Image: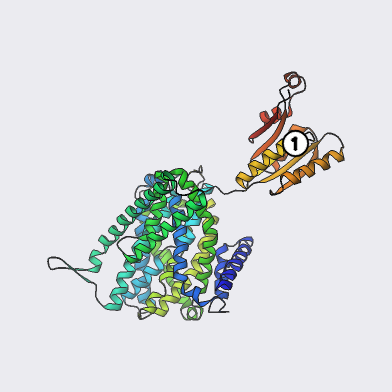
Amino acid sequence: MLESIILILLIGFFVGEIAFRLKAPPLVGMVLVGILLGPQVSNTIDSSILQAADSLRAIAVTIILMKAGLGLDREKLAQQGTVALRLGFLPATCETIVVALAAMWLLNFDFATGLLLGCIIGAESPAVIVPGMLRLKSLGWGVTKGIPDAILTGSALSDVLLLLVFSLLLAFLSQGTTIVNLPGGITLNALQILPFQVILQIILGAIAGWLTARILVLLLVKQNWTKNATQDTLVAASMALLLVVLAAKFPVFSGYLAVMATGFFLIELDAPLARRLRNGFDTLWLVAQIILFVLLGASIPLPVLENVLLVGLLILAVGTLVGRMIGWYLSTLGSNWNLRERLFLLPGNSAKATVQAAIGAIPLAAGIEGGETILAIAALSILVTAPLGAWAIPTFAPKLLEKGEVDPTKVAMARRIILLAAVDTSPLAVDVLSKVAELARRCDGEVVVLHVMQSDDAESIDRLQQQTKQLLADIRYRFITVTGVVSEEIISIAQEYRVAEIVIGKRGHRLWENVLVGSVSQTVLEKSLIPVTIVEKIKI
């Protein structure tokens, strides 16, 4: 089992990076690794891991939904009015119905079995859509109108709806009854109470998320049970998983919606805690996505795909291009979205992966007629739409969406931090290097050490390099020497390397010297558009 985990993590990571460097989504490489390591090809993954695949997928989906909740913007959602709500119901409903009709025509399914297939195919993948939308938010695409927020919320609501309908249809097809007896001799068809179940799951899921967020603030902030951000993330992730487990045992609320609501309410209740958790869940997702997509690939039934390849592709195309587009049109009707923004829903809101992997095999296991075909089409939807969606979201966003101002309080701003230390051969260089080292360790940054030579003193430069090596031993750095006007070279190199901050030294307060010849640090401070930190040594 341990060998399989190592293979999944290492090979999944590196093949994902190879795919990324080839301009393909990393999940493509991870899914291919799952196919190659899975039972269909080499059968390398230990059977115990495959048996635990559902639980591992639930953990990964919980992490990504928590990330989604921590990235939602209440003001943008309020600005959209009912668009997010309509996106949660109309596209999924229209696609489900169109897929059901297409299955009746092409596969000779009855309407109930066709709807079962539609519920599986119509569900959207949080594993593809959530990171895609959060990346758009971090870059500013569509944020002015809250388009990523509307898509995030809509995808979560649509999955709640389709999973509920799926469970009812499965009970109907496997047991042949959908009658619910109520007090007073009232009997209702399960389809008649479906709207009430959907509303109940959404309301109770939101309440559960609010309560969980309150508990987390109480434990992590007010009573200080944790000592650092890592412990905060561990406790929050465990609480989120507990919601999913409780929802499975007591299916009166949506566990996944409750997880997303927890993140959303944390922003409102304690923004600093939400920021710490956002960074922590970003780190967890780096591992979780590898496990999720490798196991996705391992679960795909390759031998079954051949028989339904063309028919399955036709059903997917009709469901997306007819059903979903009708739903998208109705969802954005009367909104402030323009035509290009509505067209973005095609690449931005169509990916299938996690839900299909989780429930695609259930009809076959339950003995539903046509279950093998349903499983094959579910697998086909993953292979086609997940990589396509992961590629299309960042590709088409700059072409179809407008770029707005990024709100750093709602997304994790991950970027490489580079600091510049401008040093000479005086004793003050040690203080400058010590200060830049302190700043670099705080942000896990890199350092450019710059020395502008005014004379050819090889011995002093060697000593400066040795001091740099000693003081920056645990920090990535590069040592650069140039000639020229000191202040101009400092600003030029800082711009060339796109540094976040300049650290420079200043010797004393000799006012007469500044008046006559000027101060290098003062010149850099006045002319640089990049923040400057001055390390000063007072001469007595």
Q: Is residue 159 left or right of residue 305?
A: left
**What x and y, as percent, mark residue 84?**
38, 52
- Check the picture and name the quadrant holding the N terminus: bottom right
Q: Is residue 251 above or below residue 258?
A: below
Q: Is residue 337 above or below residue 289?
A: above
Q: Which residue is drawn at the image coordinates 35% and 74% (left, top)?
A: 114
- SS assignment at label 1: helix
**What x and y, as percent, mark residue 216?**
41, 50
**What x and y, as percent, mark residue 237?**
45, 57
Total marks shown come to 1
Amino acid, disc 1: Ala
Residue at the left extreme, as displayed = 184
Closer to the camera in the image, 398 or 415: 415
- The residue labelled by disc 1 is 429
Rendering quarter of residue 239: bottom left
**What x and y, as percent, mark residue 286?**
55, 59
Rendering quarter of residue 174: bottom left
Q: How is the image coloured?
A: rainbow
Q: Is residue 15 above or below residue 402?
A: below
Q: Which residue is drawn at the image coordinates 51% and 70% (left, top)?
A: 295
Whether residue 48 is visible to the viewer of this picture, yes or no, is yes
Q: Which residue is drawn at the image coordinates 70% and 31% (left, top)?
A: 524
Closer to the camera in the image, 95 or 261: 261
